[in-house]
Amino acid sequence: MNRSDFMRSELIGLDVVVLSAPFSGISGKVVDETKNTFTISSAGTERMVPKPGNEFRFIFGGKHMDINGTEIQHRPEDRIKKVR
């Protein structure tokens, strides 16, 4: 999967690791997404992490993709509909 296809795909349900401070080290599954945040479930707790100013590593099918949060700062339904 190339980068542009990945950024238009559904991110809820993917494993993610936050790479940037002060949220670095938070990891788990994306359980919700808004225009500006991800909600990540890990060890029975949910943490809301802002997209702007953070870098995320999404893990899927044994591969990973690092994405800057500002690149995907759209409502999920708008991001998925984006035309190349």
Image: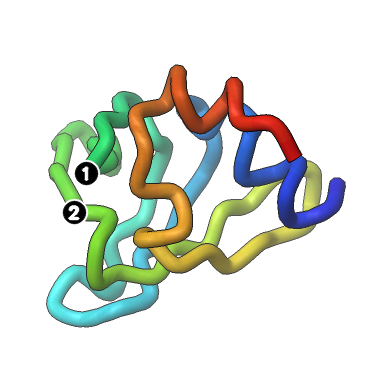
In this picture, residue 35 sits left or right of residue 83: left
- Which quarter of the figure has residue 17? bottom left
Mark number, residue 36: 1
Q: Along the line of sight, which residue is nearer the eye, 74 or 1?
A: 74
Q: Position of residue 42 (x, y in %)?
A: 28, 42
Which quadrant: the C terminus? top right
Within 10 Å of the Cα at label 1, are there few (<14), some (14-19), or many (20+) other Cα atoms? some
Q: Nearer the viewer, mark 1 or mark 2?
A: 1
> Residue at horizontal 30%, vertical 25%?
32
Answer above or below: position of 13 versus 4: above
Name the element at disc 1.
Answer: loop
Q: At 52% across and 44% down in the image, what residue appears?
A: 15
Question: Residue 78: x percent and y percent?
Answer: 46, 24
Please name the amino acid that badge 2 sits on. Answer: Pro
Is residue 19 depicted above or below 7 in this figure? Answer: below
Camera-nearest residue between 4 and 13:
4
Check whether the beta carbons of the residues at disc 1 and disc 2 lie within 8 A of each other: yes
Q: Looking at the picture, which amino acid does disc 1 mark?
A: Asn
Instruction: Point out which mark residue 50 bears.
Output: 2
Residue that lies at the very extreme toward the bottom in this rendered image: 21
